[in-house]
Amino acid sequence: MVTEASHYLLAVAERAAAGYVARTGPRAILVTGSAAEGVSDSFSDLDLIAYYDRLPTDDQLAAAHALVQATDIRASSGRATESTIEEYVLQDIECQVAHFTIASWERDMASVLEEFAPATHAEKAIMGLLDGVALHGDDLIKRWQARAATYPEGLGRVCKPVVAPRMGPKARRFSGRRPSQAPDLATVAADVPHRVEFADTP
């Protein structure tokens, strides 16, 4: 059963996504974490990931913030060429948004699904992808989800797959402790080559 808080967070996510689609031109947008899983409560925040052929400029991001009337905007202190993270408040909800290039994300997926490198931040990000809800670019998100849902034989020799009952026997998860929700986006972005840090705010 989806909680009332999750319904509200998804509505906020759709508003934020509309701003990005109008001003930054993402190929896809995904909501992850408790909102996607339907288990949010009154303390939950909102996690979004936007994927691009090329990252938006600071001016484009500012235009998206203005369009949706975001407040208390905090951006990463340094912009990488393939990733950036920002935080802000929208409709009284704390939002964290990661922006990645498609090329960098697909390299991260390949490190797990083709190079069989388990126990990485990329692996945790794939867990979030499998539980995520597409807000834009549904075909692209579905293609990634289908690719990630098939547990590779080579990785299976390294770590044991676990079946997730909620999604049925065909939906597999990676071994090890599964977080109660998708990983914090700042943690995911800290993985090489996406290291960004937040500046201190006054």
Image (cartoon, helix red, strand yellow):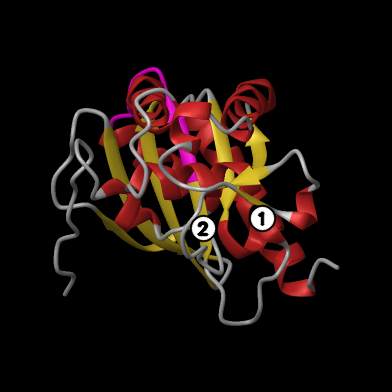
The answer to whether marks 1 and 2 mark residues whose Cβ atoms lie closer than 8 Å is yes
Crowding near the residue tagged with mark 1, few <14, some 14–19, many ≥20 C-alpha atoms within 10 Å: many
Task: Tell me the residue that label 2 is attached to.
Answer: 182
Residue range corresponding to the magenta coloring: 49-57
- Residue in the image at 18% along x and 70% along y: 201
Q: Quadrant of residue 192?
A: top left
Judge left or right: residue 39 versus residue 45. right
Q: Is residue 53 magenta?
A: yes
Q: Is residue 39 magenta?
A: no
| Residue type at tag 2 | Ala
73 to 115, vertically: above or below? below
- Which comes before the other along the chain, label 1 or label 2? 1
Query: Judging from the image, what secondary structure is the residue with disc 2 in?
Result: loop
Q: Is residue 154 visible?
A: yes
The quadrant the C terminus occupies is: bottom left
Position in image of residue 179 (x %, y %): 50, 66
Task: Tell me the residue that label 1 is attached to.
Answer: 36
161 to 91, vertically: above or below? above
